[in-house]
Amino acid sequence: MENLARTVQTAAVVALPLMFAITLHEAAHGWMADRKGDSTARMLGRITANPLAHIDPVGTILIPLVLLISGAGFLFGWAKPVPVNFPALRRPRIDMAWVAVAGPGANLLMALAAASVCHGLVLAMPELAAVLRWPPFAMPQQIPEGFKITLPLLLIFKCAVEINVLLMCFNLLPVPPLDGGRVAVGLLPKGPAETLSLIEPVGIFVVLALIWFDPGGIMHQLFWPGVFGLARLMLGG
């Protein structure tokens, strides 16, 4: 029962930041595509902060919930991809890179905004400063009197920093169909770009192999320390 209560508590803190991190990431892709000449996302109502326009029942709700309940140690999810008609872009190869990087860029801005709120809350209540140095997604055993509102609020924004940094870094991995792969395809010379683009149909399996099997310790030694190091830097930890 205690484990269930802590899972519910963690889910309550994680749900809102995760939902907006994923959905605004997709909205940013649509916004940039619209600026670069493709109005598909705008016509379909996908350039919006309303999560209902972007939620994928499996990727936005089910998968993150299962990972959270199972104690997998990381969160992974996705929203409905924003449709982009790449031939409609004014400069398809370069503009594709701009469209791709817009999603992680939105996550970076959200992380910086959430970190600013965290520091503002700590300035107002210095007793909470130690919370910013807690491990990612750590929850208190109980909330002391006097902190019933501010501590959960601080945890939500701290979580928003960590989730947005995680999604930004993850999506920048240079493997199509992740955003980093599409940025690389847009910026590399034509030959290497075409070779890299061939990975896209099986790219998601490459990503899953990196997560689950971690060949060469890439994720353990480089990715996760980099993600949590950047989050700590933003939080002043």
Image (tube, rainbow, N blue to C red):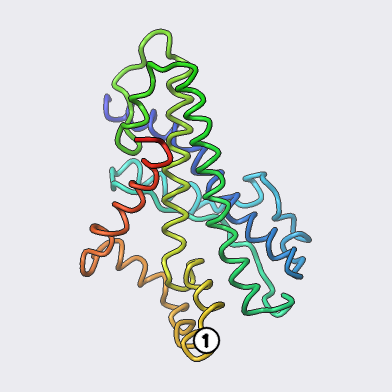
As drawn, is 110 to the left or to the right of 146? right
| Residue appearing at x 49%, y 82% in the figure | 197
| In front of the other: 47 or 105 | 105
As drawn, is 34 to the left or to the right of 76? right
Relative to 50, does residue 134 appear above or below in the rendering?
Answer: above
Q: Name the residue under label 1.
A: 189
As drawn, is 102 to the left or to the right of 38? left
| Residue appearing at x 62%, y 67% in the figure | 98
Relative to 134, does residue 66 appear above or below in the rendering?
Answer: below
Classify mark 1: helix, strand or loop: loop
The image quadrant where one finds the C terminus is top left
Relative to 1, does residue 33 appear above or below in the rendering?
Answer: below
The image quadrant where one finds the N terminus is top left
As drawn, is 62 to the left or to the right of 32? left
Q: Position of residue 25 (x, y in %)?
A: 57, 53
| Residue appearing at x 74%, y 64% in the figure | 34
| In front of the other: 182 or 40 | 182
The amino acid marked with disc number 1 is: Pro
Q: Position of residue 57 (x, y in %)?
A: 53, 51
- Extreme residue in the bottom direction: 191
- Extreme residue in the left direction: 216
